[in-house]
Amino acid sequence: MPTRPHQSSKEQTLRWAERRALVGARIRELRLQEGLSQESLALESGLSRNMIIGIEWGRKSVAYERLWDIADVLEVPVTELLLPAEASAKNTPYRGGRQRMGQ
């Protein structure tokens, strides 16, 4: 079993990238539903904002323990993070803490 990216086949590398993108899109979708900014999710989960950005864009992988931290902040079971995103996320950024419902 390969342990380093350069030891993996191209197909495996592509599968990993697709999976990172799926999980990242779902995290972004759930974050926006909760009215959280990337900064707020980062602060509440103990990750950096850059890490949250990388996860949402599918560029960074994350330790599975951190998935529980993210799920706790988003108030969902960790299994929710592994489901496909329901809709394409809107491109409108939200730069604040938690958004109140109806805003």
Image (spheres, grey):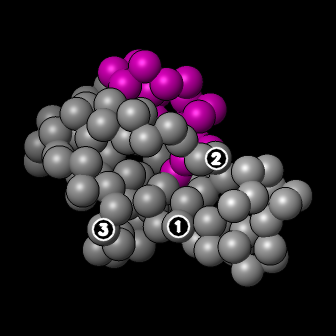
Say which quadrant the N terminus sits in. Answer: bottom right
Reply yes or no: does residue 79 show up in magenta. no
Instruction: Identify which amino acid the numbered label 2 is placed on.
Output: Lys
Q: Is residue 93 left or right of residue 97?
A: right
Instruction: Identify which amino acid the numbered label 1 is placed on.
Output: Arg
Q: Is residue 65 left or right of residue 11?
A: left
Tell me where residue 31 appears, x and y as whole percent: 32, 46
Report the front residue among 79 and 91: 79
The residue that label 3 is drawn on is: 83
Q: Which residues are magenta?
A: 37-56
Q: CA distance from mark 2 to mark 3?
A: 18 Å
Res 4 visible:
yes
Q: CA distance from mark 1 to mark 3?
A: 10 Å
Q: Report helix, strand or loop for mark 2.
A: loop
The residue that label 1 is drawn on is: 19
The residue that label 2 is drawn on is: 60
User: Are the residues at dot 2 and dot 3 in contact (C-beta closer than 8 Å)?
Assistant: no
The structure residue drawn at horizontal position 41% and vertical position 52%, both measured from the top left corner, is 28
Residue 69, compared with residue 22, is above or below; it is: above
To which quarter of the image does residue 103 belong?
top left
The structure residue drawn at horizontal position 24% and vertical position 56%, both measured from the top left corner, is 79
Q: CA distance from mark 1 to mark 2?
A: 11 Å
Q: Is residue 92 left or right of residue 21?
A: left
